[in-house]
Image (tube, rainbow, N blue to C red):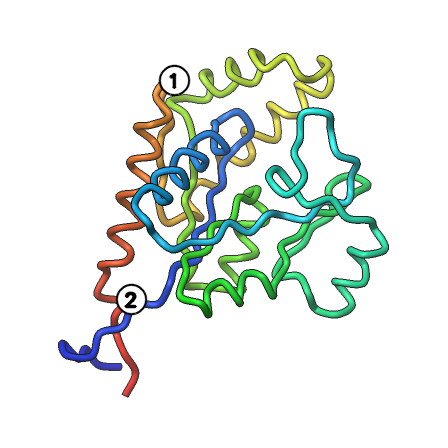
């Protein structure tokens, strides 16, 4: 490998945004993509497939793409998923062709995944940029989960326990971004700075002779 100052090429980024439930990663990612739209930055957001029933507050193609278990099984058999996992009695996964086609077109690709999915992407695509969205403290994370009031007591306890486990895996990521209470735009600016820095990184502009 050598650095050629007259023939530098930076490949598009595969960016994975993850973090524990309650950290506000959806809000932060929404602000990031909105700003990239304003800047005219080429990117694609690949929506995760999900086999469970759509909830009343979810939008098809925005929150998830909802498919049948039969269709999901076909995609597994056809090697059509970049990563997938069982979630209770349902399944979630990332369509491989959409990711690869978007990268091949020269656009960055953004994925919103849980911590387990991010770990799989790191194994399959080592050059991916993994960003962990979190909050100021574990106590703050519990408070945010409690304030959502979207789950019964038993489900909430399970969600909190899982979030603590996800926090323990922070060290597996490339970057950690704190989403301050009431200031998601601050976290979004940090993510945007990471993207800019990665595009300017010398290690991403090393060309093979």
- The residue located at (39%, 59%) in the rendering is 13
Q: Helix, strand, or loop for circle 1?
A: loop
Horizontal and vertical percent position of residue 68: 82, 49
Q: Where the C terminus falls, by quadrant? A: bottom left
Quickly name the residue at label 2: 204
Query: In the image, is residue 96 above or below residue 69?
Result: below
99 left or right, relative to 94: left
The single residue placed furthest to the right in the displayed view is 70
Query: In the image, is residue 57 above or below residue 86?
Result: above
Which circle's residue, 2 or 1, is located before the other in the chain? 1
Figure label count: 2
Q: Where the N terminus falls, by quadrant? A: bottom left
Tags 2 and 1 touching, CB below 8 Å = no
Quadrant in the rendering for residue 99: bottom right
Horizontal and vertical percent position of residue 73: 81, 59
Horizontal and vertical percent position of residue 6: 14, 79
Observer-nearest residue: 115 or 71?
71
Quickly name the residue at label 1: 181
Observer-nearest residue: 85 or 58?
58
Horizontal and vertical percent position of residue 84: 67, 54
112 left or right, relative to 86: left
Quadrant in the rendering for residue 4: bottom left
The single residue placed furthest to the left in the displayed view is 5
- The residue located at (59%, 15%) in the rendering is 148
Q: Helix, strand, or loop for circle 2?
A: helix
Quadrant in the rendering for residue 5: bottom left
Number of other residues with Cα within 10 Å of mark 1, as a class: few under 14, some 14 to 19, many 20 or more: few
- The residue located at (33%, 41%) in the rendering is 38
Number of other residues with Cα within 10 Å of mark 2, as a class: few under 14, some 14 to 19, many 20 or more: some
Whole-number angstrom distance, CA of label 2 to CA of label 1 = 34 Å
The single residue placed furthest to the bottom in the displayed view is 209
């Amino acid at each position: 490998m050598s650095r050629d100052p007259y023939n530098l090429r930076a490949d598009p980024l595969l960016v994975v945004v993850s973090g524990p439930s309650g950290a506000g990663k959806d809000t932060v990612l929404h602000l990031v993509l909105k700003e990239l739209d304003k800047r005219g930055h080429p990117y694609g957001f690949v929506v995760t497939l999900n086999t469970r029933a759509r909830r009343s507050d979810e939008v098809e193609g925005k929150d998830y793409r909802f498919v049948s278990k039969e269709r999901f099984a076909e995609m597994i058999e056809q090697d059509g998923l970049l990563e997938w996992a069982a979630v209770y009695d349902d399944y979630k996964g990332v369509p491989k062709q959409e990711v690869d086609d978007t990268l091949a077109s020269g656009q960055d690709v953004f994925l919103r995944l849980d911590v387990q999915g991010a770990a799989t992407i790191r194994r399959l695509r080592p050059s991916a940029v993994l960003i962990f969205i979190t909050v100021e403290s574990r106590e703050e994370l519990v408070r945010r989960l409690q304030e959502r009031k979207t789950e019964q007591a038993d489900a909430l306890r399970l969600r909190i326990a899982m979030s603590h486990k996800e926090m323990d895996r922070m060290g597996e990521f490339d970057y950690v971004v704190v989403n301050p209470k009431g200031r998601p735009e601050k976290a979004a600016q940090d993510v945007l700075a990471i993207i800019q820095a990665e595009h300017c990184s010398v290690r991403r502009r090393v060309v093979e002779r």
